[in-house]
Amino acid sequence: MTDACDHDGHTPHQSGSLGIPQIGQFDPVAFERAVNDMLVACGVAPDSVHTGRTAQRVRELWQKRLLGALSSLLMLSRWHDRQLLELNPGLGLERP
């Protein structure tokens, strides 16, 4: 499998990173506001009985499951690389 991406002008991410790199900390208040703004942009009331918790649910999905899972995978990957280096110092892997 290759790191190539079919997006125009895409620069492959650095080794040891997963997905799209974050440029700052996750902002839950701004994220929920953005979800509500998207609902309004679609002509949907963000505070109806059906959508009242949508912003919270979407934020929790991203914050805990998507971004949290990527962070956990990256930590596991770095731990694995350190273990490989300790067991096989001649592998030529860079130390994290």
Image (cartoon, rainbow, N blue to C red):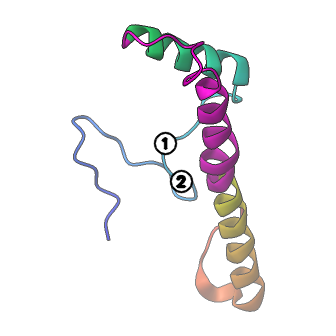
**Mark 1 to mark 2: distance in Å?**
7 Å
Q: Residue 96 at what x, y percent from top left?
A: 71, 61
Under tag 2, what secondary structure? loop
- Amino acid under disc 2: Leu
Q: Residue 45 at what x, y percent from top left?
A: 50, 10
- Residues marked 1 and 2 touching at CB (< 8 Å): no
Residue found 64% across the figure and 32% down from its top: 59
Q: Residue 4 at what x, y percent from top left?
A: 29, 55
Q: Is residue 36 above or below residue 62?
A: above
Residue found 61% across the figure and 24% down from its top: 55
Residue at far front of view: 49
- Amino acid under disc 1: Ile
Left or right: 74 with respect to 42? right
Left or right: 86 with respect to 8? right
* Residue 95 in view (yes/no): no
Q: Nearer the viewer, residue 72 or 1?
A: 72
* Residue 80 badge: none
* Residue 10 in view (yes/no): yes
Under tag 1, what secondary structure? loop
Which residue is tagged 1? 20
Q: Nearer the viewer, residue 49 or 11?
A: 49
Q: How many marks?
A: 2
Q: Is residue 84 magenta?
A: no
Q: Is residue 3 above or below residue 92?
A: above
Residue found 78% across the figure and 84% down from its top: 86
Q: Is residue 69 magenta?
A: yes
Which residue is tagged 2? 18
Q: Quadrant of the N terminus?
A: bottom left
The span shown in magenta is 42-70
Q: Nearer the viewer, residue 31 or 94?
A: 31
Residue 61 location, quadrant: top right
